[in-house]
Amino acid sequence: MKQEQFDIKFVRKWPEDEIVNLYKAGGWWKDHYDKSAIKHLIKGSFVFAIAIDKKTGKTIGMGRVLSDGVSDAYIQDLVILSEFRAKGIGKKIVKKLINHCKSKNINWIALIAEPDQEGFYENIDFKQMKNYTPMKYDEK
């Protein structure tokens, strides 16, 4: 059996620069953001997962869950560095996040997929919520 080239683990803290690098890779980091907020972002997550390349020790991916720990859970911020994509890392992170939620009896798990990523999530049992529309507060 082929040995995985990466580890996935849950963390309560991680070097800020490594997480910022992942947010930049996802296109979600703005220059005016304060990287010191990363420690609060990780701590405030129900669970925060990182993927590490076993060869280099480099942080190559992440994902997290927001939840009250009782009912619903939302997966967000799943990103894998481009050179490590299509190796099953994202799928393993999502599965590990789902399993953690289920171990806490949280079975209503949702996410909002980036455009053109629906197929990735459909392959791991997510379905579009017909008749529901994701919405975001946008103060004018």
Image (tube, rainbow, N blue to C red):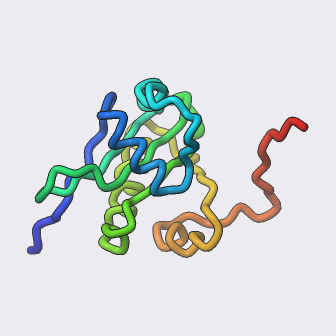
Viewer-side residue, 4 vs 131: 4
Query: How many numbered circles are shown?
Result: 0
Question: Extreme right residue here?
Answer: 140
Q: In this view, does 116 lie above or below 34?
A: below
Q: In this view, does 39 lie above or below 115?
A: above
Viewer-side residue, 22 vs 49: 22
| The N terminus, quarter of image | bottom left
Residue at point 39% right, 39% down? 48
The image shows residue 130 at horizontal and vertical percentages of 76, 65
Dividing the picture into quadrants, the one containing residue 33 is top right
The image shows residue 89 at horizontal and vertical percentages of 32, 63
Viewer-side residue, 105 vs 53: 53
Question: Extreme front residue here?
Answer: 31
Residue at point 61% right, 73% down? 116
Q: 112 left or right of 106?
A: right
The image shows residue 135 at horizontal and vertical percentages of 79, 48
Viewer-side residue, 139 vs 105: 139
Residue at point 32% right, 29% down? 13
Q: In this view, does 23 lie above or below 44?
A: below
Q: In this view, does 76 lie above or below 86?
A: above
Q: 45 left or right of 108?
A: left
| The C terminus, quarter of image | top right
The image shows residue 121 at horizontal and vertical percentages of 52, 67
